[in-house]
């Protein structure tokens, strides 16, 4: 048992990725503030990177890290556009919670 | 073995900080918990031997994106934030069984055995070069098309953020 805990396994990365993904998903649903919803989304995106890196570590590959790089670039662009939308929502509608966005017509 | 101990340390820190991201009510505290989680995750990357990815995580996430969030939080007035309830408790209670179902499914998948096929072509190259060199070689040969597409995506999102963030003459309420 101790021997199994002290050698790297792919399962440990997967378990950590699943736990963080669940926390991020729960945060996305339970939060009301738009900014904190985006932050939970960042946590969920990072958990996927952990799974990629874990597969690389166990399998002696490099491809997963390249996909994780793409995920980081995607998260950067998502943060820019999402925060721009939140800022304009607040400036035009004075809305900062999800339950205050009640109409879509501009 | 030391790598494993570092993994367990950083994993427990990241789970703790992730719970803080969901539970904390003040948005500034949420940013700080998120920062802790991101730094711990970069530590996991370092302990797994992905040095380039860990340093990029530190540079892009911990510095750039966290500054984004703090900049946007300062644009929102504080009095309204403190007055409102931050969590939707009804949705939280009703969603909790599904999150538990996700965990049960993950447990079943792990118990039934996760296996990946061994392919040790890269390992011989990594011994001669470092992690960053191997990633560069792969990125600019096999994944070059995806790399170019990703740069176009970043350009599009930059233009979109500039268009969304400009001042408008009239407000709608």
Image (cartoon, coloured by chain):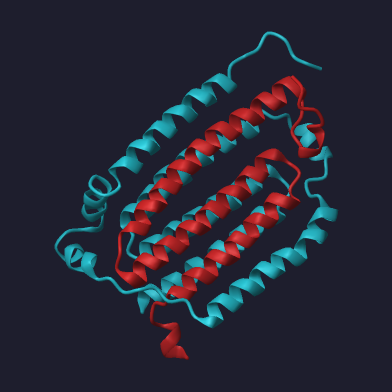
In this view, A43 is above or below B125:
above
Q: Looking at the rendering, in which quadrant would you find the C terminus of chain B?
A: top right
Q: Quadrant of residue B89?
A: bottom right
In this view, B156 is above or below B125:
above
* Residue at 47% in and 76% down: B114
Q: Quadrant of residue B134?
A: bottom left
Residue situated furthest top in the rendering: B169
How many circles with numbers are drawn on the protein?
Answer: 0
In this view, B136 is above or below B8:
above
Q: Position of residue B100 (x, y in %)?
A: 71, 69
Chain identifier, cyan in the render: B
Relative side of B135 to B7, left or right: left
* Residue at 55% in and 82% down: B111
Relative side of B147 to A105, left or right: left
Q: Position of residue B83 (x, y in %)?
A: 84, 38
Q: Position of residue B71 (x, y in %)?
A: 58, 32
Relative side of B138 to B59, left or right: left
Relative side of A30 to B143, left or right: right
In this view, B25 is above or below A20:
above
Which color has been applied to chain A in this rendered view?
Answer: red
Residue A16 makes an appearance in the image: yes
* Residue at 47% in and 55% down: B39
Q: Looking at the rendering, in which quadrant would you find the N terminus of chain B?
A: bottom left
Q: Position of residue B67 (x, y in %)?
A: 52, 37
Residue situated in front as seen by the camera: A2 or A66: A66
Residue B58 makes an appearance in the image: no
* Residue at 53% in and 33% down: A80
């Amino acid at each position: 048992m101790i021997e199994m805990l002290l050698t790297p396994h792919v399962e440990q990365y997967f378990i950590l990725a699943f736990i963080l993904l669940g926390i991020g998903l729960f945060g996305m649903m339970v939060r009301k503030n738009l900014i904190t919803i985006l932050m939970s989304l960042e946590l969920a995106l990072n958990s996927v990177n952990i799974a990629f890196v874990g597969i690389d570590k166990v399998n002696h590959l490099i491809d997963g890290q390249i996909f994780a790089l793409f995920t980081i670039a995607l998260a950067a662009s998502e943060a820019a556009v999402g925060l721009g939308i939140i800022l304009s929502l607040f400036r035009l509608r004075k809305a900062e919670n999800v339950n205050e966005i009640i109409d879509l017509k501009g | 073995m030391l790598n494993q101990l570092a993994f367990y340390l950083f994993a427990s820190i990241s789970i703790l900080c992730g719970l803080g991201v969901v539970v904390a009510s003040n948005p500034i505290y949420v940013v700080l918990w998120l920062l802790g989680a991101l730094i711990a995750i970069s530590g996991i990357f370092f302990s797994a031997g992905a040095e380039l990815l860990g340093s990029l995580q530190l540079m892009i996430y911990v510095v750039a994106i966290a500054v984004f969030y703090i900049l946007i939080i300062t644009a929102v007035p504080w009095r309204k934030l403190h007055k409102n309830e931050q969590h939707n408790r009804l949705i939280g209670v009703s969603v909790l069984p599904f999150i538990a179902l996700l965990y049960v499914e993950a447990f079943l998948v792990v118990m039934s055995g996760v296996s990946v096929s061994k392919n040790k072509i890269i390992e011989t190259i990594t011994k001669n070069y470092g992690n960053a060199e191997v990633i560069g070689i792969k990125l600019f040969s096999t994944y070059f098309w995806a790399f170019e597409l990703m740069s176009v995506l970043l350009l599009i999102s930059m233009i979109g953020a500039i268009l969304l963030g400009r001042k408008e003459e009239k407000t709608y309420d």
